[in-house]
Image (tube, grey):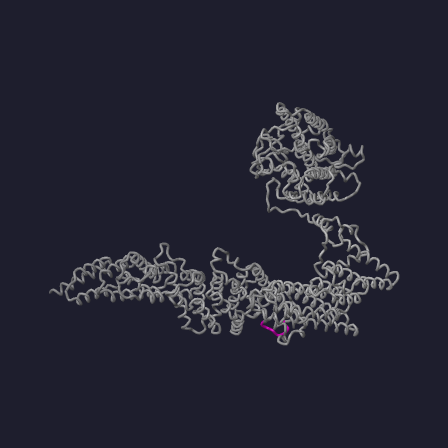
Amino acid sequence: MDNCTPASTFLTDSLELELKTEWCNPPCFSCDFDNRGGGKHFSGESYLSSGALKRVILNLDPLPTNFEEDTVELFGIEWVTETALVNSSRVLFHLFRQQLYNLETLLQASCDFGKISTLHCKAHNIRQLCVTFLHYVKVFIFRSLRVHNAESHVPVHPYETLEAQLPSVLVDELHGLLLYIGHLSELPTTNTGAFVNQNHTKLYPPSWHLLHLHLDIHWLVLEILHMLGEKLKQVVYSHQFMNLAGDNLTNVSLFEEHCENLLRDLINLSLNRYDKVRPSEALMSHHCPCPCIKELWVLLIHLLNHRSKWSLSESFWNCLNKLLRTLFEKSNDQRRSVLTVQPRDPLGFSWWIITHVASFYQFDRHGTPDEMRQMESNWNFVEELLKKSISVQNSSFSISWLPLKGLTYIIKSPLAMVEMVKTCCCDKQGLDLYKSSSSYTIFLCILAKVVKKAMKNNGPHPWKQVKGRIYSKFHQKRMEELTEVGLQNFFSLFLLLAAVAEVEDVASHVLGLLDFLKPTFKTSPLIWKGQMAFLLMYTQKNLDIGVLAEKFSNAFREKAKEFLVSKNDEMGQRQTLWTLLSIYMDSVQEVFETSHCLHPSHEKLLNDGFSMLLRACQETELRTVLNFLQAVLARIRSMHQRLCQELQRENGDLIVQSSLSTKERHLAAVASALWRHFFSFLKSQRMSQIVPLSQLADAAADFTLLAMDLPSTAPSDLQPQPVTSMIQLFGWDDIIWPQVVARYLSHFLQNSMLCEVLSCSGCVSFQALTVRSWIRCILQMYVKNLHVPDDSFIDINPEQAVEKDYMEQLTELTRLLFNLSEVKNIFSKSQVEYLPIPEDPKKALVRFFEAVGITYGNLQTFSDKSAMVTKSLEYLGEILKYIKPYLGKKVSSAGLQLTYTMMGILVKSWALIFATSKAQKLLFRIIDCLLLPHTVLQQEKELPAPMLTAIQKSLPLYLQGMCIVCCQSQNPNAYLNQLLGNVIEQYIGRFLPASAPVLGLGQHPVLLALKNSASVPPMSLLKKCIAHVIRKSYFEFKGSLLPPRLASILAFILQLVKETNTDVTEIELLLPGVLKCLVLFSEPQVKRLATENLQCMVKACQVGSGGEPAAQLTSVFRQFIEDYGMRYDYQLYSILEAVAALDQQVVIHLVPALTQSLKDSERKWGLGRNSAQREAYSKLLSQLGQVGQDEIQRLENDHVESIL
């Protein structure tokens, strides 16, 4: 059994089949492994570590590499592998029992030091024979057993007859085997010695082997029965035991019976250990005597839970709990009371064992611990244990020998007090009343039963007698003597009397008695709970609560006032007051939720105490008050809807209609009270963060719906259209937190009736205003995080900087908004309505901006375009105000990135709209605010890195959009062209490196704007503007001092000429500066870049002019000769030589000018013929072919003539 390596645990079954490994010893129980490090829980040979359990559960071959030969050796005899079990099943099981007997006889031998080795070997070999046989049975069932059709009448081979009987024979033999070995707990070897698992000699007595063989048998019988059911998919009946004993024994019933017996045995073993455990060590002391028992628990957990998922079998917890419940029964049923050890403390033992067994759920099918593994719930049984644990501690009327005295069950709320009394008044009490209830509760149950029966038989007279006796027991002195427990029992008693008799009489008497209490008791939460319990009872009996409401609401007002003036450092006093106020709110909420209709007295419960309370609350307290408000609002709306339905049904009955109208007036009165005492506070908190934003939005939405249902109840400042006024306050106002707006608008858009009301009210812009608010909510998604240092978001995804709840709310708002008819119309006209709505709100906003731009571009008439421009500007509103928080001193990288990207997309997508005179003003403000703010214009001042990054990524969008506007503008605007030039001037330099990069400037945002531009006219305008800016800003230098970043701008120009179709007009602007650099500077990098620029420009002119020299290019060189011919003649000739190598014609056209410049130079210096200059010039002319030779000859002739 030592040949299987633990590595097989990690192999899949398919891999194991492919490995073709040799015979591997079958798994078995073993505690013979080294666990000194504490990291190993089970032996490598175990059913868990070897993967045997997993194969059984997944219905795979139990031993893929074993029993592959034609014959198999079982009990020392060779058998045919594929037929042995069919032909000789009873013989094999007989041999199995014989080997068991041989092992049992070894127990009688003395295990002295000289014989231990021999006994160990004999016992080990016997155990291996037995285990191998049971594994063979499993493999035979999986591989060789065939399912036969019992109804077939076709003659079959005798072997097939035997094979068809094999399942029943196996059930018989397995049952007989279990009867033979008996219960695990009955083994004489189940003592401490047999469980020893640390033996350095690795030699064990026969008792150890017998015990572990019994464990193997018990488990393998379960595996075999399970596999038999999986293979046959039908119930297998035992022929022998059904005929002889009359029991309906099947493979299923045998499996369940054996599981129950095995769990009983495990419980008995645990009981043996529990009796030796000290209470202080209960959690540290485990219930498993050795790892093999622990493994058996884990195996049972996995197998039983697996079977419960796919069949009607019980789960592991159900099987175990059923047995543990028998510990608490006093039945004489011998079948169930099979425990060999009666527990002295069933409750403590149950807690102990389920606690330790629950920890086994961390082991997976391979026995590997995983603390994150999900555990099956056992809460129902835990609840039972909890009830048993506390049932002896829940009353001051306790029995003297119980462990704790004077404890009572503290009722948490007025409603719980009423429910407890209702339970006592039930006609039928459960059989466990005396176990789960206190003696005082039992007394109340008896009292209720007696009074109800007496009143039923004899009318009110018995009640008067009982009332007199009980009332007389409570007087001033008795009330002053009441403790907290006594006071609770007092309320329980009188609430019960109120429930079974006259509630008004009892409540009146109780209120009078409470005046006798000590002053310290009058602010006790229990007093408030008891009083409010009577209020709830009035409500449930549909009685007028006027008197109680007046008294309790006045008390609430006083406590709210005290709460308002209490100081924050008086936490004890505030907590006491808050407890009382919470009791009142919970009870009033219950009153509204349980009232069938409202009366004027309900309005009294909502007084100005709430106005004072709201002003005094902190955040957690505000949550409670707003939850109360929302519950009451929901109840009022529900009652109003029911009233409306009733009014529609009762069209003709005037009396019923009058009654319903009265109810509606009462509803309106309560609604007015809510507006009066709650809404003014909510309105004042629209811009603060004191109120939780989600609850502020929810409460505002509820008030909006209330305004729709009962518009007349809204305050005067919301009239005459309270719904529109509410949405203006909480949905369309730009000063409200976007978190509030998004949640509020989601509520609003979900309500189709509310949208219909707005449409019918004449509010034609409500959809546009809602779109505007949606845009603001997206643009301001990072505003709330501006107080957090920006470096805390460096490694965070921008989406993580937004609260998850807010992102989900924005997504929901986006989904609802895209269903608005106006938005649908835009997408339809832009022909992108078939695209799905993006889940990301930012992508959805991009899609909307693009759709608006496309829709405008598709319009034909001037009137339609004018209306669309107006509507588009209405969508944006004061959009620059929305992004202003990101542009302050508190920098948010994510916020700036969002701002610049979205506004860039807006400028590009809406370029045609911004080309109109009506929208150009906004475009100017966007450019001034984002691209040309005061800080940008200060060249010496560095921009914040996040802002510079955001501009770099989005600048191409702005440049492309501005160019389209310039080309399409209705009124040519010099200022717009100037803005474009200023932007290019600022950011060409901002994004130029200090030195020219080796790989070029392909990612410069200005160049990217040219690459990504699809329209030719705007691109041409942009290139021309770039050329003007470069000429003005970088080439108008004086002197020979090298300007900073000259190499970088030359690299930029080179990239510009190479990657765009540069026109001759742009070259005309840029070439003079390049030539100037070649003449004036000898710095190698500048020289190289200027030369490359010159070559590219000449080539570009050749392409643009169809091979003919461009007039503009010639003009540039002629001016260059005029400017530098006198002083820099040699450099000039060198440059023109390079040009001539590319295009002779250009230089040929310059020959007259060059010759004249030479003569002027000689004349100016007055030294006659300049031989060196003429030689350099002749070298240039020699490259011009015949024209050059003619010019050289002409110069010689002129010289000769001058001599003559």
Quarter of the figure that contains the N terminus: top right
The reply, left or right, for residue 754 in relation to residue 1046 is right
Residue 513 placement (x, y as % from top left): 76, 66
Using the image, determine if residue 1123 lies above or below residue 16: below
Closer to the camera in the image, 505 or 403: 403
Closer to the camera in the image, 96 or 860: 96
Q: Is residue 764 magenta?
A: yes
The reply, left or right, for residue 922 in relation to residue 253 is left
Q: Is residue 371 magenta?
A: no
The reply, left or right, for residue 1161 in relation to residue 312 is left
| Residue span colored magenta | 758-765
Residue 282 placement (x, y as % from top left): 65, 43
Can residue 506 be seen in the rendering of this structure? yes
Task: Please tell me in which quadrant of the rendered image residue 542 appears.
Answer: bottom right
Using the image, determine if residue 860 lies above or below residue 207: below
Residue 664 placement (x, y as % from top left): 73, 72
Task: Please tell me in which quadrant of the rendered image residue 697 appears.
Answer: bottom right
In the orientation shown, which residue stands out farthest toward the top?
Answer: 114
Using the image, determine if residue 147 lies above or below residue 1176: above
In the orientation shown, which residue stands out farthest toward the left?
Answer: 1204
What residue is at 82 percent from the left and 58 percent from the top?
447
In the orientation shown, which residue stands out farthest toward the right?
Answer: 458
SS assignment for the magenta stretch, majority: loop
Residue 670 placement (x, y as % from top left): 70, 71
Quarter of the figure that contains the C terminus: bottom left
Number of residue marks = 0
Can residue 313 be seen in the rendering of this structure? no
